[in-house]
């Protein structure tokens, strides 16, 4: 039996991190590679992933890349079919729609729910049979603190993330006896590329001041939580939402 800190190592495991060409996905991919996992990067465009893949390989890590749009289930299936056996899924793709409720029509709402929630069902369905066969698996669904704490102008995103949190719990209930764990990972305010414009705005300053830490999180600060949930150390952590928000959702005023 391995001892600490070896129980946080991921040697011999293969991890797919969706949406890992930039932002939190990239930081989690790097972290998992450093913890010993073979990492499969993912995005819509293989060429965009190439420099990231080269960076991992140059550092001596085992890595490859899969390219498919979450909306294209046939491409998803084909890419997963040609990939090595996947032990760890970090499902990190999450598109946003920052318009008001009345501006989002039925098709827009349905499209975002499809990308952010229904596609997760499709991907998990492709991976779980192999995990059951190998009696080991980690499903980590990246949600958001908005799943529990709503904000205006994010209705479809909020609904999708709430659904994803519930899906993580449902998978925990269904596969708990198979060696698979399923958890949600809920980030707070992270200073990713996508958020740079907002950080510089009055709303960004409000977010900073709202945080007990009085700062936005560095993107790399998500990686430790992802490694933990993926690791042997978290074998009995199942159906949980691990919030990484510097205390935002624990507080009313800060
Ligand atoms: N940043 C935060 O503060 C924060 C807070 C709470 C929750 N989150 C959640 O954390 C996750 C990552 O956020 P982020 O800001 O780091 O991500 P991001 O920069 O918005 O996107 C990450 C990647 O997702 C890929 N992607 C987007 N749509 C896709 C699609 N339809 N099919 C396949 N790939 C797609 C993009 O790759 P390509 O463009 O190369 O295809 C992109 O590199 C999201 O689920 C987000 O909701 C983030």
Image (cartoon, grey):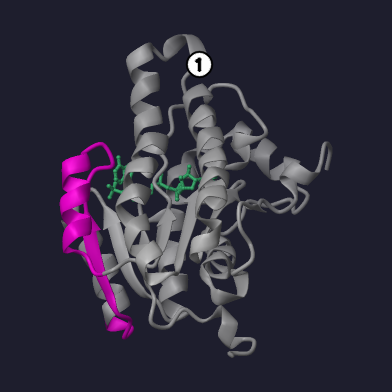
Quadrant containing the C terminus is top right
Where is residue 182? Give x, y as percent: 53, 55
**In percent of the image, x 50 and y 14: which residue is there?**
101
Image check: 137 left or right of 114? right
Q: Which residue is mark 1?
A: 100
Image check: 152 left or right of 136? right
User: Is 7 located above or below residue 227 in the figure?
Assistant: below
- Tell me if residue 143 can be seen: no
Of residue 28 and residue 214, the one placed in the foreground of this image is: 28
Which secondary structure lies at badge 1? loop
User: Is 165 located above or below residue 82 in the figure?
Assistant: above
Image check: 199 left or right of 107? right
**In percent of the image, x 73 and y 43: which residue is there?**
249
Where is residue 248? Give x, y as percent: 73, 45
What stretch of residues is rendered in magenta? 58-84
Of residue 175 and residue 192, the one placed in the foreground of this image is: 175
**In percent of the image, x 65 and y 51: which residue is there?**
243
Of residue 63 and residue 238, the one placed in the foreground of this image is: 238
**In percent of the image, x 34 and y 58: which residue is there?**
129
Judged from this view, the residue extending furthest toward the top is: 102
Task: Using the rendered view, name the quadrant where residue 89 is placed.
Answer: bottom left
């Amino acid at each position: 039996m391995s001892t600490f800190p070896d129980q946080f190592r991921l040697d011999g495991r293969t991890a797919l991190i969706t949406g890992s060409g930039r932002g939190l996905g990239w930081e989690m991919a790097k972290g998992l590679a450093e913890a010993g996992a073979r990492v499969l990067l993912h995005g819509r465009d293989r060429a965009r992933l190439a420099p990231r893949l080269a960076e991992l390989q140059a550092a001596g890590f085992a890595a490859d890349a899969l390219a498919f749009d979450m909306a294209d289930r046939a491409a998803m299936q084909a890419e997963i079919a040609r990939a090595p056996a996947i032990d760890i899924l970090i499902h990190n793709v999450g598109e946003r729609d920052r318009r008001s409720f009345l501006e989002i029509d039925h098709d827009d709402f349905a499209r975002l729910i499809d990308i952010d929630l229904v596609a997760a069902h499709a991907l998990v369905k492709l991976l779980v049979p192999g995990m059951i066969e190998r009696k080991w698996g980690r499903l980590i669904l990246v949600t958001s603190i908005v799943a529990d704490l709503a904000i205006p102008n994010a209705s479809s995103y909020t609904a999708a993330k709430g659904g994803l949190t519930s899906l993580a719990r449902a998978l925990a209930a269904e596969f708990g006896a198979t060696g698979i764990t399923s958890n949600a990972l809920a980030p707070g305010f992270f200073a990713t590329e996508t958020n740079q414009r907002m950080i510089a705005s009055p709303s960004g300053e409000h977010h900073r001041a709202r945080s007990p830490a009085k700062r936005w999180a560095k993107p790399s600060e998500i990686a430790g939580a992802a490694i933990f949930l993926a690791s042997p150390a978290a074998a009995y952590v199942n159906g949980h939402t691990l919030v990484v928000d510097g205390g935002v959702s624990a507080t009313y005023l800060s």
